[in-house]
Image (spheres, coloured by chain):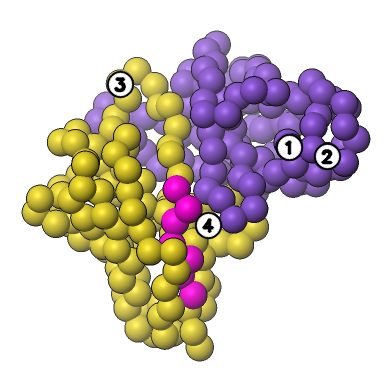
Amino acid sequence: DAKTTQPTSMDCAEGRAANLPCNHSTISGNEYVYWYRQIHSQGPQYIIHGLKNNETNEMASLIITEDRKSSTLILPHATLRDTAVYYCIVRAYSGGGADGLTFGKGTHLIIQP
Amino acid sequence: NAGVTQTPKFQVLKTGQSMTLQCAQDMNHNSMYWYRQDPGMGLRLIYYSASEGTTDKGEVPNGYNVSRLNKREFSLRLESAAPSQTSVYFCASSDPPGVGITEAFFGQGTRLTVV
C-alpha cells in the first residue's frame, strides 16, 4: 500500500469548513483513497472513499487531485462532535479477500467553539 | 443494529495468564479483523480472516492466536499475557465487493491491561 502523509494536528472553528490534506505521492493506479475517523476511545468510523473522481456523501466530500498524488477531506460545517483523529488510507483491492487497512497516526482535528 | 460486538470491554490480567477476546458481527460480512492500538499510535493489524475457515497473520501476530468459529464470530486468544500486550483491541468486519473495498465496521474496543 502507498504511504500517506498527514499533518499531526489541525484546528478549525465550529461552523466553518474543515479541510484535511493528505499526500500520497506514490499511489498506484488501482489504489483507492479511504478516510476514517476515530473519536476518542471509540472504534474507527468509515467516512468516505474514492478512486479518482471527487466524492460526496452525507458526512463529507473527498477531493482528489488530477494526478492523484494528494487529496483533501472536507467537512463542510464542522461541529464540536467532529473533533477526532482522521486517518487517510491508500488501499488496493486485494482480490479474493480483504487483508485489512494500514493506519498511520492520522490528523488530530480539534474543533474550537 | 448491533454491528460489531466485542466482549469484554475491560480486562486486567496478570503476566502469564491467558484469555480470549470475543467478537461477533451481525452484518453477514465475510471478512473479520483484529487490531491493537497503543497510546498515541494508529491501529496495527494482528490477524485477519478473509472468509469463514481461513485466517492469516497481520503486522503484529506474535503472542496471539485466532479462531474463526463461524461466519459471525472471530476470537483472539492470548496464551500467556505479557505487559507489552497492554493495549486497546479492536475487532472489525467488512465484505469485499467485486470492485474496491467497502467500509470496515469496528467494534467499541477491549481495553486490556497486563500487570
- Horizontal arrangement in the rendering, residue A21 relative to residue B88 (left or right): left
Q: Mark 1 — residue? A: B84
Instruction: From the image, state the color of chain A.
Output: yellow
Q: Residue B114: give its label.
A: 2
Task: Check if mark 4's residue and mark 2's residue have beta carbons within 8 Å.
Answer: no
Circle 3: residue type: Gly
Residue positioned most to the top: B53
Q: Chain of mark 2?
A: B
Q: Mark 4 — residue? A: A38
The mark lying in front, picked from 2 and 1, is: 1
How far, Cα to Cα, is label 4 from label 2? 24 Å
Residue A86 colored in magenta in the image: no
Between B7 and B57, which is closer to the camera in this rendering?
B57
Chain letter for the purple part: B
Task: Check if mark 2's residue and mark 1's residue have beta carbons within 8 Å.
Answer: yes
Residue positioned most to the bottom: A113
Choose the circle earlier in sequence order: 3 or 4. Answer: 4
Tell me which residue sits at (10%, 50%) in the image: A67
Q: Mark 3 — residue? A: A95
